[in-house]
Image (cartoon, rainbow, N blue to C red):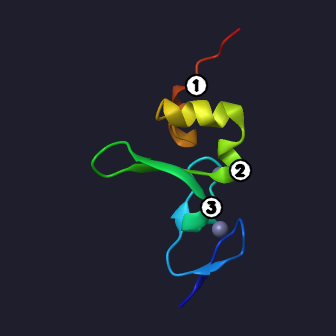
Amino acid sequence: MALTCERCKAEVYKLERCDYCGRSICFDCVKSSERVTKTSRLVICKDCWSKTGLRGMFKNRYGAVVQKSNAAPTR
Ligand SMILES: [Zn+2]
Ligand SMILES: [Zn+2]
């Protein structure tokens, strides 16, 4: 059964999930992925990668979910 990439609409057999926008994306749309712990992996799509803030979060190994729970008000 083919799955459809939510970013480019390609039909593929395996989808990754972007940890920043939550879309299911194909391998071509994955900009980068990195193992964070033994069981979890961080995936970023090309759209999110082009947003500078999210790229920084990825490099610091912060997923969208992690960032939310760690959010400290800066003001
Ligand atoms: Zn795709
Ligand atoms: Zn994304």
Question: 31 or 70: which is nearer to us?
Answer: 31
Q: Are marks 3 and 2 in contact (CB under 8 Å)?
A: yes
Q: Is residue 1 positioned above or below 27 on the image?
A: below
Question: 13 or 24: which is nearer to us?
Answer: 13
Distance of mark 2 from mark 1, alpha carbons?
Answer: 23 Å
Q: Is mark 2 within 8 Å of ligand 2?
A: yes
**Image position, residue 57 (x, y; %):** 57, 32
**Image position, residue 4 (x, y; %):** 64, 78
The residue pinned by badge 3 equals 29
Label 1 residue SS: loop
Q: Mark 2 or 1 closer to N-term?
A: 2
Q: Is mark 3 within 8 Å of ligand 1?
A: yes
Kind of residue at disc 3: Cys
The residue pinned by badge 2 equals 47
Q: Mark 1 or 3 closer to N-term?
A: 3
Quadrant of the displayed image that contains ligand 1: bottom right
Q: Residues within 10 Å of mark 1 (few under 14, many from 20)?
A: few
Tell me if 71 is positioned left or right of 74 in this view. left
Q: Is residue 43 visible?
A: no
Q: Is residue 59 visible?
A: yes
Question: 41 or 75: which is nearer to us?
Answer: 41
Label 2 residue SS: helix
Residue 12 numbered mark, or none: none
The residue pinned by badge 1 equals 71
The residue at the point 71 percent across, 50 percent down is 47
Q: Nearer the viewer, mark 2 or mark 1?
A: 2
